[in-house]
Amino acid sequence: MKKPIPSEDTVHRAVLAHLRMRAPKSAVIWHTPNGGSRNVIEAAKLKAMGVMAGFPDVMIWHAGSLYGLELKREKGGRVSAKQAECMAALTREGALCAVAHGVDHAIEILEGWGLIGSQKSKTRAGSEAARV
């Protein structure tokens, strides 16, 4: 039997749980809830207030750098034109942006950015400490 592919919401919650446990305490981590269903009046009001379509799911400000991580399901998740435009604009201004397909991919990106420690190195350190 095939294992079900986690939804984007499930991926999002899992990635945020990792960040809460493993990111530096000084990191500022947030999600801007731009999606969801809104009525026409509310959507117009938010747009007038500066809501920007396509903003990455997870934003992180740490040590003077801005990171944007767009989260997708492992299979079937696609980046919209607005998301691609927004990440390109953020990148032009110096942010690091990436698209992660699933939790493992997101963790790999966050480790590559140095925002969370490698689980592999922690496992090795733990096993070496156990041998002492």
Image (spheres, rainbow, N blue to C red):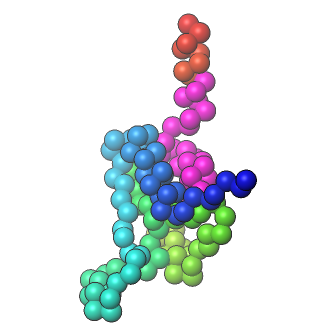
Tell me, yes or no, if residue 65 can be seen here. no
- Residue at image position (61%, 33%) is 120
Above or below, comparing residue 109 to residue 8 in the picture: above
Tell me, yes or no, if residue 34 can be seen here. yes
Give the image quarter of residue 25. Answer: top left
The magenta stretch is 96-124
Does the magenta portion include 100? yes
- Residue at image position (44%, 40%) is 22
Residue 101, position in %: x, y? Answer: 61, 60
Above or below, comparing residue 126 to residue 102 in the picture: above
In the visual, does 22 lie left or right of 71?
A: left
Residue 109, position in %: x, y? Answer: 58, 51
In this view, which residue lies farthest toward the right?
A: 1
In this view, which residue lies farthest toward the front?
A: 1
In the visual, does 28 lie left or right of 99?
A: left
Residue 26, position in %: x, y? Answer: 33, 44
Give the image quarter of residue 57. Answer: bottom left
Image quadrant containing the C terminus: top right
- Residue at image position (34%, 79%) is 51
Front one among 87 and 63: 87
Q: How many marks?
A: 0
Above or below, comparing residue 61 to residue 20 in the picture: below
- Residue at image position (62%, 73%) is 78
Residue 92, position in %: x, y? Answer: 51, 71
Does the magenta portion include 123? yes
In the visual, does 51 lie left or right of 98?
A: left
Above or below, comparing residue 100 to residue 23 in the picture: below
